[in-house]
Image (cartoon, rainbow, N blue to C red):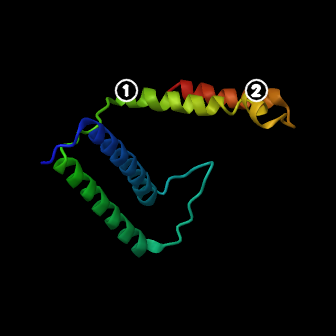
Amino acid sequence: MIKLKKQHKRTVSSGLYVIEKSIDELLCLLMNRVESSTYGIIADSGIQKDAELISKIFRIKKALKEIVNKYSLTRLTLTQSQLIKSKKTTLELYAEELLPGFLEQRYGKMEIDNNTYRNDINKLINAIKSI
């Protein structure tokens, strides 16, 4: 095992974390074909290409694990409740930025009925808060 300085360890760990989160998201999309209201994925590569890509993703995950072990990096460990609270806060912030006051402050007056739109966004915010 190789020991990195604390500041390097933190930076490398954070970078690897971001890489793995992105890889996991890609893997989830490839394997689960998530249904979404705001985006779509057209399966254009075929089952063979998907299988090859999934195999490559697992090689990347293996390389990540080897780096973590070789350089004595620690895993970020959260409880499920910490993760849910963190995601909930992030989702609330994103949703609140869709409210008319915020949008108009940044991008100018909206040409729609603000009350209806505000109610729709507030319904979304309340659904997020219910998590």
Which residue appears at 36% of the width and 64% of the height?
54
Q: Where is residue 2? Give x, y as percent.
A: 15, 47
- 42, 14: nearer the viewer: 14
Q: In this view, does 59 lie above or below 95?
A: below
- 60, 119: nearer the viewer: 60
Question: Is label 1 in a helix, a strand or a loop?
Answer: helix
Alpha carbon distance from label 2 to label 1: 32 Å
Residue 101 picture quarter: top right
Q: Where is residue 124? Give x, y as percent.
A: 63, 31
**Disc 2, disc 1: CB below 8 Å?**
no
What is the three-letter code of the residue carrying label 2? Gly
Residue 78 picture quarter: top left
- 18, 59: nearer the viewer: 18
Which residue appears at 59% of the width and 57% of the height?
40
Q: Where is residue 84? Give x, y as percent.
A: 42, 30
Judging by the rendered image, the residue that carries numbered circle 2 is 101
Which residue appears at 25% of the width and 57% of the height?
62
Q: Is residue 116 above or below residue 22?
A: above
Which residue appears at 44% of the width and 26% of the height?
85
Q: How many marks?
A: 2
Q: Where is residue 37? Give x, y as percent.
A: 62, 48
Residue 79 picture quarter: top left
Judging by the rendered image, the residue that carries numbered circle 1 is 81
Q: In this view, does 52 lie to the left or right of 86?
A: left
Give the mark nearest the N terminus, 2 or 1: 1
Question: Is label 2 in a helix, a strand or a loop?
Answer: helix
Q: Residue 25 carries which label?
A: none
The crowding category of the residue bearing disc 2, from other C-alpha atoms within 10 Å (few below 14, some 14 to 19, many at least 20), is some
- 46, 55: nearer the viewer: 55
Q: Is residue 75 left or right of residue 114?
A: left
Q: In this view, does 99 lie above or below 62?
A: above
What is the three-letter code of the residue carrying label 1? Ser
